[in-house]
Image (cartoon, coloured by chain):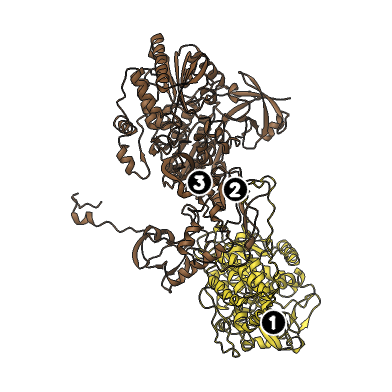
Chain colours: A brown, B yellow
Amino acid sequence: MTTTENGAQTPAETAAAPPDPNAVSLTINGRRVTARKGDLVIAAAQRVGEYIPRFCYHERMASVGMCRMCLVDIDTGRGPALQISCMATVAPDMVVNTQSPAALKAQEGIVELLLANHPLDCPVCDKGGECPLQDQSFSHGPGESRYIEEKRHFEKPIAISDLVLLDRERCILCDRCTRFADEVAGDALIHFISRGNDTQVMTFPDEPFSSYFSGNTVQICPVGALTATSYRFKARPWDLDQSESTCTTCSVGCRTVVQSSHDQLLRYQGVDSDPVNWSWLCDRGRFNFEAVNSDERLGAPLVRVDDELQPTSWNAALARAAELISEAKAAAGPGSIAVLGGARGTNEDAYAWARLAKDVIGTPHVYPQMGDGALINLLGFDRATIDEAANAPTIILIAPDLKEELPVLYLRLRDAAQKRRSRIIEFAQKRSGLSGQAWRTIEYEAGNITHAINAAANDPAIATQIAKGNVVVVAGRANLAEHPREVTNGVVAALQLAPGAKVLPALRRGNIVGAIEMGLTPEEGGMQALEIAKAAAAGNIECLVLLGCDPLADFPDTDLARRMMAGAPRIIAIDTFLTKSSSPADVVLAAAAYGEKSGTTTNIEGRVQTVCEKVTPRGTSRPDWMIAVELAELLGGDLGVTSVDDLTNAIAANIDGFGGATVAALRAARDGIVCKSSLPAATARVVEIDVRNSYDYRLVVSRKLYDNAVGTAKSPSLAHLAVGSHLHLHPLDVERVGSADGADVKVTSKRASMVFKVVADETVVRGSAWVPFNQPGPSIGELIDSSDVVTDVRVESF
Amino acid sequence: MNGTTYPHAPGFVAGDRPRIVTSRFEYADSHTLDRYLATDGYKGLQAALAKSAVDVHNDVKSATVLGRGGAGFPAGVKWGLTPQAVWPRYLVVNGDESEPGTYKDRLLMELDPHQLIEGCLIACYAAGLSQCFLYIRGEMAFAQERVATALNEAYAAGYIGKNVLGTDFSVDIVLHWGAGAYVVGEETALIESLEGNRGMPRQKPPYFPAAIGLYGKPTIVNNVETLANLPWLMVNGVEAYTAIGTPTSPGTRMVAVSGHVKRPGVYEIVNGTTTFRELLYDEEFCGGIRDDNMLKAFVPGGGSAPWFVPDQLDLPFENKLVSAAGSMLGSGAVIVMDDTTDIPAAALTLTRFYAHESCGKCVPCREGGTWLERIMRRIVDGHGTPRDLDQLIEVGETICPGDFPHAASERLGLDAVPFPYKMTTICFVGPSAYAPVHSALTLFRDEFEAKIVQRNLIPVSIPVSIPVSIPASVGATDDHH
């Protein structure tokens, strides 16, 4: 804004915008248009409504110029010449003609050549109806083929991974999938083999395309060459009904479209949200709709009668639940009731339950995590957005393996490192998916994060790097066998190393940030998960409410979880499935799942985005918030809401920082609304720990993308991808314990002794032992005591 | 006089004209460092190092040393295109000589490897390049061996490495063997191959190797013969160099002649003045057409060049004149066809080569080249239809829109269409598949028509590619359709 010397604005000056130094003026199809310096002609043309046909070009990947479909006439002063618009950048006074006779002839010629070997089995092809080749043959093709030779033949289709099938006859060799695998995902496991007309996309021998992001190749394939096992022959595109939504599998908040047919979820596709997911999804988020469709879903509430859970009516179930709460209240006051969980639902679910617990029941003991997250005040630091992180000169990682826990955040940070925008300084208890991209990977032993960061401060190269400013710390729980306070300690130490740095919390569970912000957190004097568990185990909790959570699976300290469940005389579970933890409950209230309820969700940045109801809830199951409203009524309270929109507006009215996220504002916002947290920042409390006995190994426990969580375990496509519970040691440590890769070892902590298969794994730091959490096989949680800062184990070979 | 041949240099014929790059070919031990040093070896390097790099660069510019790889771009100008501020900067020697009919660089590498190495060193010094990569075609095992031995000798003698000959000029030369792909002779594909990727060309524009090349750094790609000229130029000076040939095409050039001549082989001829007639008919060179047959057609610049007919025999080896006449001098290979040649079959042979060598990257070449080959195959096998001839042209127009260059023919009353052509492909492999088809069809359409009239009515099966076996771990699913 320009101002005059005395500070008053003159109308003329405010009207004339300063000329943009990056503006480029050019002519496209006779129209004078303005583009930005560095824009590709194909993108600039599209922005002004001139669509140039394309197959290989994808706006989120580097252009390669393989398909030649985007040939247009470009005149840069030397007369019009055919150029591919996906690799020509705009220049001042360039004249582009996408409709010249030469351009049209070239485009028709390319379509004819592409169709020469394409099988035209559109009637039985999943892509038919949404196929760029089909569409552009119609719009830009010659309408007939003069090719009378026999077409290329391949065996069709072949499985290139557990999730993706490849039909090489349909493939037009656009390099999209192979480029994605190499450039975006970093899993260059598919490539071209052979040459010329025999070129084909193929995996390396005996090495399937096992990428966490393989589903994206199906989405970006411009023909039906790549198909996902979960969607093959399920529907035709014109039979699909779709709505835009946000994935809640993890807390990155990827935008998706949810597609259904005949009231059944059939497919999720990524939507290009510039600040979040750039159209990518991870395979877990893309394919776990199968769990929503699972036959094992709860379709009605259950009540325990004669020690057996029996389906019943909602009236009966809710009455029983209210009765249990009232009994507990009568027995030992409202403080004897604890609510655990709530991070899997929507903001509205969390808000309604927080109000129910705190205002109606009156308990301060509410906690959204299972002792597997971080301290809630991690959200109180000056928060970075994903974009800020992915454009920061320096990213400090004190986080779990992002590739396993927040896969699309991994893609964004990988891109930042690959394109040399950012240098990643990683503090790792085990090498992660990003270690290959990191500028520095500093290995440290659990319990020592403060020392590791303080030591790094003495490295002059790191000091110089951090002095460049704009540091973002990505922080989360790297080790479930380590006390969550260590995450906070790490952040505080990192902020001393890089004062003024912003923090991006790397918390995992779908709406964990929303749950915390909505108030599913302890009131004054309230207990957090570990304390609730201990209190329940000691018989001090009269009623335990499990709000969509499974402590027996997710609590790192399995023994304590078991004792908590045994010690609580009344358990109410709100769940979509009968899990380990909901099975022993007295009342199980059937909850609607993702895709069956609308509302909003909050991602790690604090970005509030909408989720949509696409299909009707299974049976009589209903959203968590509705259950809360009805329970409140039965308990003599009134939450004062009757719809999701009421709740969204109530959140905007009552939660500090969320004032902008009203129903109307969310409807208008393309990329959601970033809301600021009002939580205070956490403070450090460093506890000195004993030096590890050199015969012991420090236990590192973290999650893999595919585990026993219901979303994965109940999705047939994903269930078998869980790696299994094995003990990973550095190869030299395997040798040191006198064992061999694949052999059994005895692992002993102060809690218990168990037998694991040992795996030699170079990503494990020497002196540490890593075990993936919640996997099929022996449960590592049996060895963990959550009260300790770290867990050391003895490993013995047989 | 008759050209002289040597038992140790099969394929080479020495004429009596001035020789620049083949001067040592007469010695049986021409590839050794001893012989090289005894015949002015590494004197050019010493002369260059005695001057400033800018002076050497200016010498090469004023001598107008033309690139011998195909495009004929002046080497001195090319060197000047690299941004000076970026470091490191690379020299890549294109020794992937695989254009059909071309085998001159192979002799240069086999018989005089030190001359090439010295040329590389002079180029690196003059253009300020820090490292040289010598990329030699995979199939040329003997050349690889000779160059490797020479490199070891030169390293041991202090001509390569740190502080060359005691100066502060340092350079390393790395030898790299190709894996056998014609397209890697294209400079950007060669760079991809050097980087360890599939040999597929890069689209240019936007980026030319001189600005963004090997490992994203400024890169000069020069042909073997171009660099082999530099030692002589440095020793004998610019005037001596430009005294040979014409002002626009100075010096000499090597030409490989194959096909229906009495004495096929590699000749060093004077650039710009020697005519095709002299090359094909003089006793000093090829000595006439085999069996004294009539000449029917010849390819003037490697398999991808449009064809000439006897009308063009008196053209000299001059880029501009040959371009205006509808073809190119290309890589210095002349393929001669006498009047016994089955023209459609000859064109098919060339087209099949280019279709087979397509890297598969861009559609017009990958699909169009094979389509051309299949139609040609049908015609040659006697299964062509009258529609096929227009179809060939129409497919060709998708690869090369607009008028395709061809030679003039008095017999047909045709005027020449000048070189170059337009193309929808990334590199020249696609148009190269079309060039023989177009030339043959334009200049000898009657022969195609004759084959179609005498149609073989018994159908033959067309070969179909066989499914490639799949990895054991990823089995086929059962829902074929």
Residue at 53% from the left image edge and 61% from the top image edge: A67
Lower sequence index among marks 2 and 3: 2
**Viewer-proximal residue among A12 and A551:** A551
- The amino acid beneath tag 1 is Val
Numbered disc in front, either 1 or 2: 2
Residue pointed to by mark 3? A235
Residue B185, picture quadrant = bottom right
Residue pointed to by mark 2? A165
Q: Do the residues labelled 2 and 3 touch (CB within 8 Å)?
A: no
Residue A320, picture quadrant = top left
Subunit of label 1: B
Residue pointed to by mark 1? B336
Numbered disc in front, either 2 or 3: 3
- The amino acid beneath tag 3 is Ala
Residue at 70% from the left image edge and 63% from the top image edge: B138
Is residue A436 toward the left or the right of residue A41 in the image? right
**Viewer-proximal residue among A41 and B60:** A41
Q: Are marks 3 and 1 in contact (CB under 8 Å)?
A: no
Subunit of label 2: A
How far apart marks 3 and 1 lie (CA) works out to 61 Å
How far apart marks 1 and 2 lie (CA) works out to 51 Å
Q: Is residue A184 visible?
A: yes
A412 is higher (above) or lower (below) than B214: above
Residue at 62% from the left image edge and 21% from the top image edge: A749
Pinpoint residue A201: horizontal percent, then vertical percent. 61, 54
Q: How crowded is mark 3: few (under 14 residues within 10 Å), some or many (20 or more)?
A: some
Have a look at marks 2 and 3 and say if they share a chain: yes
How far apart marks 2 and 3 lie (CA) works out to 17 Å
Residue at 61% from the left image edge and 87% from the top image edge: B315
Q: Residues within 10 Å of mark 2 (few under 14, many from 20)?
A: many
Pinpoint residue B140: horizontal percent, then vertical percent. 73, 66
Q: Are marks 1 and 2 in contact (CB under 8 Å)?
A: no
